Amino acid sequence: MFALKAIVTWTHPRSGKMHTGVIVRVYQPNGSERYVVQVWRPFARLPRHYRPNPTWLKKLR
């Protein structure tokens, strides 16, 4: 559904926090496609890696 290096955004339904990041890995556990998204946070030395629910994701570009 989403390509590698696509820029995606999502809002976590419970916390309401919005994240924007780049897909760095696509993998298929038991037939469903999942993504690892790298998110740069302000003032952080290293990026965070998230594995959001694919139904939350929206493509930016």
Image (cartoon, rainbow, N blue to C red):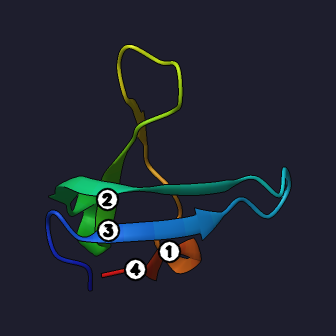
- Lower position in the chain sequence, tag 3 or tag 2: 3
First in sequence: mark 2 vs mark 4? 2
Seen in the picture, residue 59 relative to 25 is either above or below; the reply is below
Residue 43 in the figure: left or right of residue 34: right
CA gap, disc 1 and disc 4: 10 Å
Residues under numbered marks 3 and 2 in contact, where contact means CB atoms less than 8 Å apart: no
Q: Quadrant of residue 48?
A: top left
Q: Check disc 2: other Cα within 10 Å, few if <14, some if 14-19, many if 20+.
A: many
Query: In the structure shown, which secondary structural element does the residue marked by tag 3 occupy?
Result: strand
Q: Tell me the residue that label 4 is attached to.
A: 60
Q: Which is in the foreground here, disc 1 or disc 4? A: 4
Q: Which numbered disc covers residue 57?
A: 1
Q: Can you say whether 39 is above or below 26 in the image?
A: above
Query: Is residue 55 left or right of 29 when viewed as pictured?
Result: right
Alpha-carbon distance for marks 3 and 2?
Answer: 12 Å
Residue at 40% x, 80% y: name it: 60
Whether the residues at callouts 2 and 1 have beta carbons within 8 Å, the answer is yes
Query: Gap in Å between the C-alphas at discs 2 and 1?
Result: 10 Å
Marks 4 and 3 in Cβ contact (< 8 Å): yes
Question: Mark 2 to mark 4: distance in Å?
Answer: 15 Å
Residue that numbered label 2 is attached to: 35
Q: Position of residue 23 (x, y in %)?
A: 26, 58
Counting from the top left corner in percent of width and height, residue 8 is at 40, 69
